[in-house]
Amino acid sequence: MREDSTLPFDDMQINDDDNIILFDDERQSLDNNENAWKIMIVDDEPETHTITRLSLRRLKVDDRPLEFISAYSGEEAVQLIKTHPDTAVILLDVIMEENETGNLPLF
């Protein structure tokens, strides 16, 4: 991220305390995601989560938006899968904390 926290996107807000980036359309759609495809991003690098959300945030599949769920460790991913069994796609970094982390059994 750039030092001055200004990015070339008009609809982006950065909360420096939490390092959270929200886009106007994300804030508006947070309550309206009943029909969204759940996409889980599992990676220990926060930048991967940010760029994935930025790249795919306006994508719709079969007229359904995407809802992103983030996990930053293998353990967190396993818990989130149990909480969100209706997850459509998992984007998984198989080499995170250790070489075998991405190979954890889900159940």
Image (cartoon, rainbow, N blue to C red):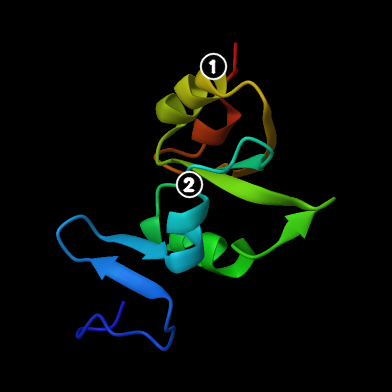
Q: Is residue 35 left or right of residue 104?
A: right
Amino acid type at circle 1 is: Lys
First along the sequence among labels 1 and 2: 2
Asked if disc 1 and disc 2 are in contact, CB closer than 8 Å, the reply is no
In this view, the mark in front (1 or 2): 2
Q: Is residue 35 left or right of residue 100?
A: right
Residue 24 placed where, x, y %?
44, 67
Q: Which residue is at a point 49% across and 42% down the rendered structure image?
A: 31
Amino acid type at circle 2 is: Leu
Q: Which residue is at a point 54% across and 16% down the rendered structure image?
A: 82
State the image quarter where residue 9 is shown. Answer: bottom left
> Does 60 sit above or below residue 8?
above
Residue 78 placed where, x, y %?
50, 22
Q: Which residue is at a point 38% across and 56% down the rendered structure image?
A: 46
> Does 29 sit above or below residue 83?
below
The residue that mark 2 highlights is 30
Question: Under tag 2, what secondary structure?
Answer: loop
The residue that mark 1 highlights is 82
